[in-house]
Image (cartoon, rainbow, N blue to C red):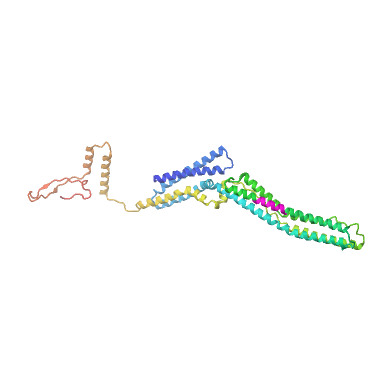
Amino acid sequence: MNARIAFCILILGATSAVAGYAGLNISFPHDSLWMKLFAALIAAAIGVAVATFWHIAFQVVLKVMQRRLQFLAWAVVIVGCFAITGMSAAWHVAAIGGDAALTAAVYETLDDGETALGDAARSRNGYRGFQSRLSGFYDEVGSLAACEDAIGCITGTPGKQGVYGTLIGMQGKIEGIIKALAEDDRLSDTRLAEGRQCLADFRAALSSGKAGGEGGVAASSAFDCVNAAVAAIDGNGQLERIAQEMDSLTAGLVLPVSVKTVAQKQAVENILASLRERASSIAADARKAVTPATIGTISLERMSAMKAVIVYWDEIVAAWVTGIALDLIPVLFLAFEAIRVTSTRALPDADTEISITEAIRTRKALNALEVAMTPKASVSEYQKTIEATAEPSRPVPFYADDNSPPYHEEEIEYREEDAPERGRESV
């Protein structure tokens, strides 16, 4: 295996171990020495396993020549990639993007708080419609009282006695309900502004880094403020109050003692029955307007970094890519190295047979080279080896110039190592 690739795998294994320890350390619920040691042990095992796996993969995949075994080796590598990813990728991501995922959880809860405030504010429209009906009822009772005082339109006897006093008392109760609703409306506006301000302050603190990843005390305070505002703003309470007040508005009413004649009694009973029916109608409509409790309590769910990176994975895609690549980037090195080795390797079915003569000569040459490379070999031994491996010399005809005797033969010793590429030839 290439030294640079081996060094890179070693660095990746060490990085995987460190990232695994960081992810385990922030994901364990208890911050104790034992848990830290346990996390360190697991992280070390992960780092060693990753480095060992890729070292063996390079040793096996690059040396296998048979096609069937190559497929098998790559199948084992792919299975190992899945195993390594499942073993350590999540811890890497927790170490890299855990804080970002926890912050995303806080921001989502902030959005839920703003939604709850908006729903509570809209719920006030349910009882605001009854304010106008109560105002009309108030005016109606006041008109009857004024008419009775001026011309005695109910009893026939004008004056501020008897029926007039009863009507004025009823009008006072209606006015009290209207004023209470107006005060509730004012307090709701104040609480709504306070709740939104709490969320805005906490969001600003979170953006500036003054609040921790999980929010801590600042988050609890902010969401308590929101819950209080929602409870104060929710219109169901005001609707129930209207219904109860209307039910009790005409309860216990009796005919005044000033009403003596049968005609007066019948007229007063008709007026009171009409007012009672009007109040009952308002109470029934108010109860119908009460909606099911759809606005729950807003609270920040406490979760570990491991759970946060899974739930809010779409917020930390880059962290997931980096965490997985820490373990799987060597597979790219292995693929490139396999391509390079395959391109320089002879095909397994290539014709590599040589003749017996060539094999003998090659063996002799290797023996001579081995003796020559041995430090204890002397010059004489080397010479003997050369002579033993050389073929015997033979006479070679030599043709001299014109002044030399014809057909003169001189024995010339010619060795193959002098010109191995040419062989023996006549001179």
Residue 62 in picture, x, y percent from top left: 40, 49
Residue 51 percent location from the top left of the image: 45, 44
Find out whether residue 186 is within the magenta segment: yes
Q: Residue at (42%, 44%) from the top-left corner?
A: 7
Query: Does residue 297 appear anywhere in the picture?
Result: no
Q: Position of residue 205 (x, y in %)?
A: 60, 47
* Residue at the right extreme, as displayed: 261
Dominant secondary structure (helix, strand or loop) of the stretch shown in magenta: helix
Q: Tag count in the figure?
A: 0
Is residue 255 found left or right of 5 in the rendered image? Answer: right
The reply to whether the magenta stretch includes residue 192 is yes
The residue sitting at the top extreme is 376
Q: Is residue 324 left or right of residue 149?
A: left
Chain part drawn in magenta = 185-196
Question: In the image, is residue 118 above or below residue 413?
Answer: below
Residue at image x 27%, y 44%? 366
Residue in front for this viewpoint, 262 or 12 = 262
User: Residue 89: image x %, image y %?
Assistant: 51, 47
Q: Is residue 20 at least partly visible in the picture?
A: yes
Q: Is residue 147 left or right of residue 422?
A: right
